[in-house]
């Protein structure tokens, strides 16, 4: 095999993938596509001031912390991607233009313009592929072990977008399969939270990757959680939301498990093996 002529990451730089609790006992399997804002040294800051890396264009503020707390509370496996979404967006098909944005919201990204093909391939090969290969490998191991699985992808969204405030607290996102989101919505029915289906975004084949590829194609129940960032921007909010979601995910899984056992639904990879509840 020919050695690539251009490498993105130096040998001493962190790998793209961070795996937590690979032997976690929970049915919930967590991912966080936009967990970090690290930058490969070769790319500098992509021509941007440091302040831009504190914004949503660089990462999902608070999402990684909530996912890590949930992983600990549930004893759930978690796969995170630590490099900034400005390098490559790991929740986009790598062939679409928005995967390596030249403009994000209203901010131009000078370092992403007119990239040579080998530079694009390096970002896919060294960041995108290892992240999704790890998710795929972990889900395959669970399937072979006959373990029930619910894929939960943790994201966050800006409280103000293009001058308009968002009152939504939590979005439940999916595309063709609403099973788990429906049960989660039912568990949320008595809460005081402002919750909506497929808001402020919706999952699609051209705009998303994790849910369509790892959830839908495998037939695994799934949901993408979008939490408003100001609610999880500090440690107190992160702990509060992790505690809230721990109970909600457990209740939603119990509802879905009952439905599966009564023959009202199928669970793809997750139907094999015993139906143990969330830890």
Image (cartoon, rainbow, N blue to C red):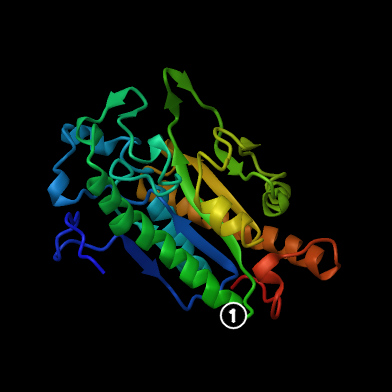
Give me the residue at 56% from left, 43% from top. 205
Q: Residue at x 70, y 80 (%)?
A: 274
Give the vertical position of 181 relative to 16 (above or below): above
Q: Is residue 251 left or right of residue 34?
A: right
Q: Where's residue 254, x and y in %?
A: 72, 65
Residue 235 pos. (x, y %):
36, 50
**Which element carries disc 1, helix, strand or loop?**
helix
Q: Quadrant of residue 233?
A: top left
Return the x and y of residue 102 as percentages of the image width and height: 30, 30
Q: Answer above or below: position of 64 versus 48.
A: below
Q: Write the residue at 60% across / 70% down.
A: 27
Q: Is residue 252 visible?
A: yes
What residue would you read off at disc 1? Answer: 144
Residue 75 visible in this rendered orientation of the protein:
no
Query: Is 268 placed above or below 22 here?
Result: above
Q: Which of 135 and 51 lies nearest the eye of the viewer?
A: 135
Tell me: 2 left or right of 253. left
| Camera-side residue of 86 and 194 | 86
Residue lying farthest to the top in this orientation? 163
> Residue at coordinates 47% horizontally, 58% vertically from top-left?
31
87 or 241, nearer to the observer: 87
The N terminus: image quadrant: bottom left
Q: Tally the marks.
A: 1
In front of the other: 210 or 258: 210
Q: Which of the image's four quarters has the C terminus?
A: bottom right
Q: Residues within 10 Å of mark 1 (few under 14, many from 20)?
A: few
């Amino acid at each position: 095999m020919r050695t690539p002529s251009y490498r993105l990451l130096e040998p001493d730089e962190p790998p793209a993938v961070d795996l937590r609790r690979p032997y976690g006992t929970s049915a919930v399997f967590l991912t966080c596509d936009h967990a970090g804002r690290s930058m490969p040294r070769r790319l500098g800051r992509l021509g941007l001031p440091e302040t831009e890396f504190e914004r949503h264009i660089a990462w999902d503020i608070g999402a990684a912390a909530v996912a890590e707390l949930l992983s600990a509370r549930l004893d759930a496996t978690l796969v995170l991607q630590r490099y900034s979404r400005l390098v490559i967006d790991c929740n986009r098909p790598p062939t679409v233009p928005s995967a390596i944005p030249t403009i994000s919201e209203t901010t131009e990204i000078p370092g992403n313009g007119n990239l040579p093909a080998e530079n694009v391939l390096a970002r896919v090969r060294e960041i995108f592929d290892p992240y999704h290969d790890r998710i795929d490998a972990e889900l395959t191991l669970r399937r072979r072990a006959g373990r029930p699985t619910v894929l939960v992808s943790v994201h966050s969204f800006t409280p103000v977008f293009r001058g308009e405030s968002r009152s939504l607290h939590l979005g439940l996102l999916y595309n063709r399969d609403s099973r788990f989101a429906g049960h989660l919505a039912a568990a949320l029915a008595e809460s005081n939270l402002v919750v909506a289906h497929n808001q402020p975004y919706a999952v699609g084949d051209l705009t998303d990757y994790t849910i369509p590829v790892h959830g839908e194609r495998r037939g695994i129940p799934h949901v993408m959680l979008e939490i408003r960032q100001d609610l999880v921007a500090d440690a107190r909010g992160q702990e509060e939301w992790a505690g809230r979601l721990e109970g909600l995910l457990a209740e939603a899984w119990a509802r879905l498990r009952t439905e599966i056992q009564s023959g009202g639904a199928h669970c793809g990879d997750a139907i094999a093996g015993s139906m143990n509840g969330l830890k």
